[in-house]
Image: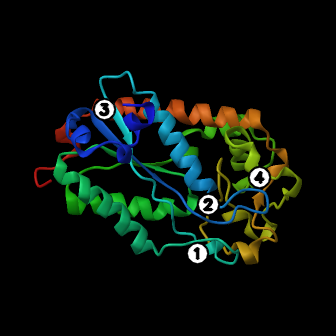
Amino acid sequence: MSLNNQIHLWKNTWQEVDKLDRDRTLILIPTGAIEQHGPHLPLDTDIFNATTISEAVANNFLHSENSVLVAPPIWWGTSPHHLGFPGTISLRNETMSNIVVEVITSLLPHGFYRFLLVNGHGGNAGILTATVSRISHDLGISVPALSYWTMIKKTLMEIGESPIGGMGHGCEMETSLLLHLRPELVHMDLAEKEMPSELTSWSCIDFRAGGPVGIPLDFKRDSKHGVMGDPTLANAAKGERIFNDAIKTITSFVDEFFALEKSVLVSKRG
């Protein structure tokens, strides 16, 4: 099999999948969004980041006794706060939750029980937390979920030049990451700095340390260009550090996750 066939679930045949050792196989499920990211970044920023990071993590296990596969990405997320901008596609919370549950419900009867949700969209975090609780109750398995930036907050604090609020959306972090991964789709000449106003300081979004109060946003109302942060401070070197550190920390978690016994992850009713 080629490299891609080894890590992408959908590029394998059913017989190749059936040969996998269920106790030594983990399936990564990337989640993200198709939503506006300001005038300078593409609509698929979130799902692209989650998928690319998942693929890099899976590649780290190609020569391991354990197998890590990437499931087809769940492209769409919960993005009602971005619907004021053309191109955004948003799922209802219950739809997003049902898709995740049904993907896992499809694979569970075939003996797979190690799953990890790798999220790239901040708006998905709440529903994913609720969904993995639902999966535990309804399906009897423990499925962790992480957002890649939560694994590298120290890195973000070290490289960030903007004040808090500068890494919110279409920002210093996301723009840097895409400048590293696919600069041909980044229009830095159109990048706009839009910092949160004082009226929203208690609820400002920032990948390093957001505000303590959660207030639903409407980016058409709360920003001029769909940005919250300072993408003008982004560069490819920062993006490379973000990418590599995210892969390193998530790989470390996966190593520990493989060390957990099946009895810890699967309940007696599961």
**Residue labelled with disc 2:** 212
**Residue labelled with disc 3:** 258
Please state the horizontal and vertical placement of residue 211, each as a whole percent of the image: 65, 59
Q: Is residue 83 above or below residue 179?
A: below
Instruction: Please state, as top left, top right, bottom left or bottom right, where the N terminus lies in the image.
Output: top left
Q: Earlier in the sequence, mark 2 or mark 3?
A: 2
Residue 67 in view, yes or no? yes
Kind of residue sitting beneath label 1: Pro
Q: Nearer the viewer, mark 3 or mark 4?
A: 3
Q: Which residue is at 83% across, 45% downward?
A: 233
Other-residue count near label 3 (Cα within 10 Å), few / some / many at <14 / 14–19 / ≥20: some
Please state the horizontal and vertical placement of residue 22, each as a whole percent of the image: 21, 38
Q: Nearer the viewer, residue 241 or 105?
A: 105
Kind of residue sitting beneath label 3: Phe
Residue 216 in view, yes or no? no
Do the residues under discs 1 and 2 have CB atoms within 8 angstroms? no
Q: Secondary structure at mark 3?
A: helix
Question: For the residues marked 2 and 4, what is the alpha-carbon distance in whole angstroms?
Answer: 16 Å
Q: Earlier in the sequence, mark 3 or mark 4?
A: 4
Q: Which residue is at 70% across, 74% downward?
A: 85
Q: Which residue is at 75% across, 55% downward?
A: 165
Q: Secondary structure at mark 1?
A: helix
**Residue labelled with disc 1:** 80
